[in-house]
Image (tube, rainbow, N blue to C red):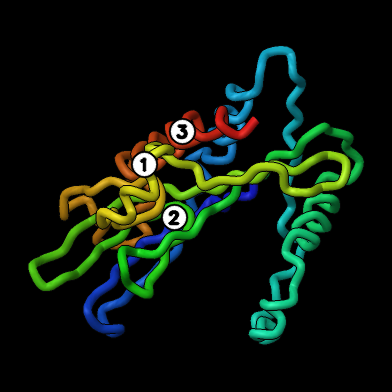
Amino acid sequence: MVTTSDEFTVLTTGLTVFQNKKMVVPIPGWGLSDLIFARTRAAIPAGVSVLRIPYDPAKFPPRDESEDTLKDRLFRDLNAELAAYTREVVKGTNCRHYIQILNSVSPIGSSNYTIRGFGILNQDVVLGRRIYLYALAFIRIFDGRDFSVVRQSSALINVHHSLVQRLLGALVSGPYRELPAESFPVRPEDAAGNPALRDGVRSMLAESLDKTLPLLP
């Protein structure tokens, strides 16, 4: 299953909320879902059949955030919800395991801001602005019999050093790279047609999947 969305976030954060700007741009032409399936297939041992299961988000209504109370978060059985969700998506198939790859979330440094999935960040700070491109994915593997989660991890390039990097001040928990200031799109909607941004995201996504998937047998 591939549940990452074909969206790219153009985000600016500053010292005040008045500097913050965010726009989500559709990127269906980037082929991220096809890339994810190809890298997943490459990580599966030869001779093992792999089925690509279509994901239809329209089948699942958005969660009502007004019901997301503290009590609800404390007493929800997240594993049971994941099992029910996955069972519905794969209905009619019979696989030993199911692999779900979706957008991951990371805090930005020590701030209260977070980023999700794929995007570009303009940090407008006192000494100037810094531009970062990121590609954040999360891998979850379900048992095909009871739909329990048997393995899960963020897709990482530096798999064995992620925690150390965060402790040493890495900006994002996941693949990201700093870009020149002129890389940030003047108009957010122009990001979808920018081959440098597309290729950068695809490169980081492919490398992170290639390095993480083999560690999740």
Tell me the crowding category of disc 2: few under 14, some 14 to 19, or many 20 or more residues within 10 angstroms, Cα based: many
Q: Position of residue 147 (x, y in %)?
A: 82, 47
Q: Is residue 23 above or below residue 155?
A: below
Near-viewer residue (201 or 84): 84
Q: Which residue is mark 1?
A: 161
Q: Quadrant of the N terminus?
A: top right
Q: Residue at x 74, y 26 (%)?
A: 50
Near-viewer residue (128 or 84): 84
Q: Residue at x 83, y 39 (%)?
A: 144
- Label 1 and label 2: CA atoms lie apart by 27 Å
Residue 178 can be seen, yes or no: yes
Q: Which residue is mark 3?
A: 206
Tell me the crowding category of disc 1: few under 14, some 14 to 19, or many 20 or more residues within 10 angstroms, Cα based: few
Q: Residue type at mark 3?
A: Ala
Q: Is residue 82 above or below residue 204?
A: below
Q: Position of residue 205 (x, y in %)?
A: 45, 39
Q: Residue at x 76, y 30 (%)?
A: 51
Q: Secondary structure at mark 1?
A: helix
Q: Position of residue 191 (x, y in %)?
A: 35, 53
Q: Point out which mark residue 139 bears.
A: none
Q: Secondary structure at mark 3?
A: helix
Q: Residue type at mark 1?
A: His
Q: Residue furthest top?
A: 47
- Label 3 close to label 2 by CB (< 8 Å): no
Q: Is residue 127 left or right of residue 43?
A: left
Q: Residue furthest left?
A: 127
Q: Point out which mark residue 8 bears.
A: 2
